[in-house]
Image: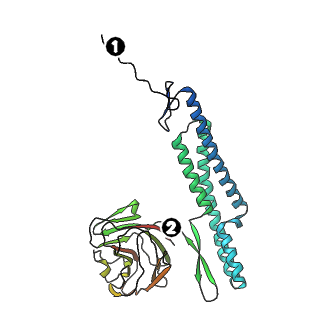
Amino acid sequence: METPAETTKVLCVICTKAKGIFKCEGCSQVFCPKHSTDHRNELSKQLDEIALTHDLIQQTLNQQTKDPQQHPLLKKINQWESKSMNKIRQMAEEIRNEVLKSSVQHTTGLKQKLQLVSSELRQGREENDFSEIDLHQWIQKLEELKNELHNPTTINIQEDSTTLISKIRIARQNTSDIFERVCGTVDIRDNGYLVVKHNSNDHTEMRGKNEYSNGIHTLQFRIEQLIQNGWVFFGIISKLEPMRTLSYYSPSTHGWSNRGQVYTAGVHSFIKTIDVMKNDTIVLLINCDQRKIEMKNERLNRTQELSIDVDKCSFPWQLHLNLHAANTAVRILSTTD
C-alpha cells in the first residue's frame, strides 16, 4: 500500500536543521526563529554603520557651511594667490567670490540630497522595514554624496598660463552634450554617451547634440575599444553641413585623425598628429571666441591646435567624430562650459 509523500521541509539556511519559517525578502533566504532574529540584528548593525557614514558627511557639511573658506577649491585659490603675490590679488578676489557663491549652491544641493537619505534611514529604522536592497541603495547614495562633498564635480579650477602669471577660471560641469546623429554603421548607447561601431570596417559619421556659437567648451572622451592602427577622427563641423559617411571630406570639417592627418575645411594634410589607443582620454577644446579648436591626449600630455575659418565653417559648430575600424567604441566623459 502506497503512503503519501512526506511534505518537503524548508530548512534554515544557517543551521540546516530547524524548519525554516521566516523568509527574508531582501536576500530571499529562509531562517528558523532563532536565526531570523540573528539575521535581523546583523542588518541593524549594518544600518548603524550606514548611519555613522551619514553623520560624518553631515558633520563635514556643517563645517563647510559655518566656514566656507574650507571648501577644497578655495584652498587651491589661496595656494595660487600666495605664489603669484601682488600681481594676482585682484584676480584672486574675483574668482574667490565666484567660488564662494558656487560653494553655497553646492552645499545647499548636497544638504537637500542628504536630507532625503536622512528621512529614508529614519523611516526604515522606525518602521523596521528595510532589507539588504535598501542598505545597498543607502550605501551607494551616501558614497556618491561623500565623493561629491570631497571632490566636487560641478566646478573646477583651471590655469591659463601667461608670461607673468597663471590666470585661473571656473570650469563648470555640464554633461548635456551627447551623441545624437549618425550616418553609417554605429550604435548610440547609454543615453547618448557611448557610440559603438558595428562589426564592419567602413567610415561612419557621428555628431553631438549641442550647438556651439560662443564661449569655450571642453569635451572629454575615453577610447573604450580601438584595434591597433585603428582609425578615428575628432573635430568639429558646421551644423548646416549635410551628413555623410566620408564626413572628414565635408567642406566645413576641421580636426585630426590619429593616423597623421589634419583636416582643414575638408582638405587633409599629413603631419605628425597625436597617437590614440584603447583606454586613452582625449580632450577636445572648442573655443568659439578665438575661433580655434585644440585636442589633447592626457596619456601623452600632448596638445594640437587648429584655427577655424568661419567663412568655411559657419556657426553653429557641432561635435564631429568619424570611426572606421569594426567595434570601435568611444564614450563622452564630460562637457565643461
**Res 88 quadrant in image:** bottom right
Residue 60 coordinates in the image, percent (x, y): 68, 57
**Residue at mark 2 to residue at mark 1: CA–CA distance:** 72 Å
The amino acid sitting under disc 1 is Thr
Residue 334 coordinates in the image, percent (x, y): 48, 68
Q: Earlier in the sequence, mark 2 or mark 1?
A: 1
Q: Which mark is residue 43?
A: none
Label 1 belongs to which residue?
Answer: 3
Label 2 belongs to which residue?
Answer: 174
Tell me what residue is drawn at x 43 percent, y 24 percent: 9
**Against 38, is 239 above or below?**
below
Tell me what residue is drawn at x 52 percent, y 32 percent: 14
Quarter of the picture containing the N terminus is: top left
Give the foreground label among 2 and 1: 1
Residue 176 coordinates in the image, percent (x, y): 46, 66
The amino acid sitting under disc 2 is Asn
Residue 241 coordinates in the image, percent (x, y): 32, 78
In the image, 219: left or right of 225?
Answer: right
In the image, 207: left or right of 285?
Answer: left
Front residue of this view, candidates 14 and 74:
14
> The residue tagged with tag 1: helix, strand or loop?
loop
Outermost residue toward the top? 1
Discs 2, 1 touching: Cβ within 8 Å: no
User: How was this image coloured?
Assistant: rainbow
Tell me what residue is drawn at x 41 percent, y 85 percent: 308
